[in-house]
Image (tube, rainbow, N blue to C red):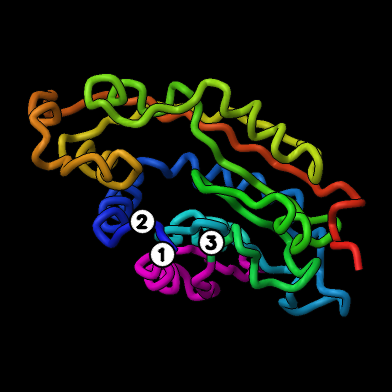
Amino acid sequence: MTGDTADMLDARAAFQGAGHFAPIAAALARALDAGSHADAHPSGGGTGPGRTVLEIGAGTGYYLAGVLDAHPDLLGIALDVAKPAARRAARAHPRSAAVLADAWRGLPIRDGALTAVLSVFAPRNPAEVARVLAPSGRFVVVTPTARHLGELVGPLGMVGVDPDKDRRLADSLAATFTRAEHTLVEFRMTLTRTDVINVVAMGPSAFHGTPADDPRIAALPDVTEVTASVTVSTYLPTPSSSRRDP
């Protein structure tokens, strides 16, 4: 198994902790507002499996923790393929637990057990997500647009976003899900040079060098205005895809 390194997670925790992506976390929590009570436990109360949210590729657990803060009736599971991430995410919120697993090899969750599944800048396994969601569950996906971090991508040689990413996402989910909501979340961030180092070090560009030693970052001004731009899409499982065939 592969995944984020401990250094990448440290950088991500520092960047998230500074609040730069707080509007994304808030939009993700709002995306669950309509569905957080839709799938109550069959007994009509308690916090049964139908009130549980799973985040795939949870990393630090930052986004899952934000959802749990906004929805006190929910429990959370943070799933990640990297051991350092699972360890960190296990401490992200008192109502969450962490699981070390590769989503592409299957989700260790029983059929129809979840109120929602979250995927924030992370890979997805649509068939498995459809299997573990309750019939009225919600799959919320956050993906960057081509404008995301655009002021840094060119000057720093960062890995860019495919302009066709949104269409490819919709196509990949079309067989198992119907898109119910699609929201653009775009805002400006004021980043110090340390923030820039962290945002480079927490993503795939970190595999191409050590950001702290990059002369291109040293050449930036003390403060840089940078665009954050993502889409928050909510998908509902089609009736035929919510369970595996027996």
Instruction: Say whether residue 12 is magenta.
Output: no
Task: Name the residue that disc number 1 marks.
Answer: 82
State which tag comes first along the sequence, 3 or 2: 2
Disc with the residue nearer the chain's start (2 vs 1): 2
Q: Residue at x 57, y 22 (%)?
A: 164
Q: In the figure, residue 129 lies in which quadrant? A: bottom right
Which mark is drawn over residue 69? 3
Could you tell which of marks 3 and 1 lies nearer the N-terminus?
Answer: 3
* Callout 3: SS: helix
Residue at image location 8% in from the left, 40% down from the top: 213
Task: Give me the C-alpha separation between circle 3 and circle 2.
Answer: 25 Å
| Residue at 73% across, 40% down | 173
Where are the magenta residues, as a range?
Answer: 72-101
In contact (CB < 8 Å): disc 2 and disc 1: yes
State how far apart marks 2 and 1 are (Cα).
Answer: 6 Å
Q: Amino acid at mark 2?
A: Asp
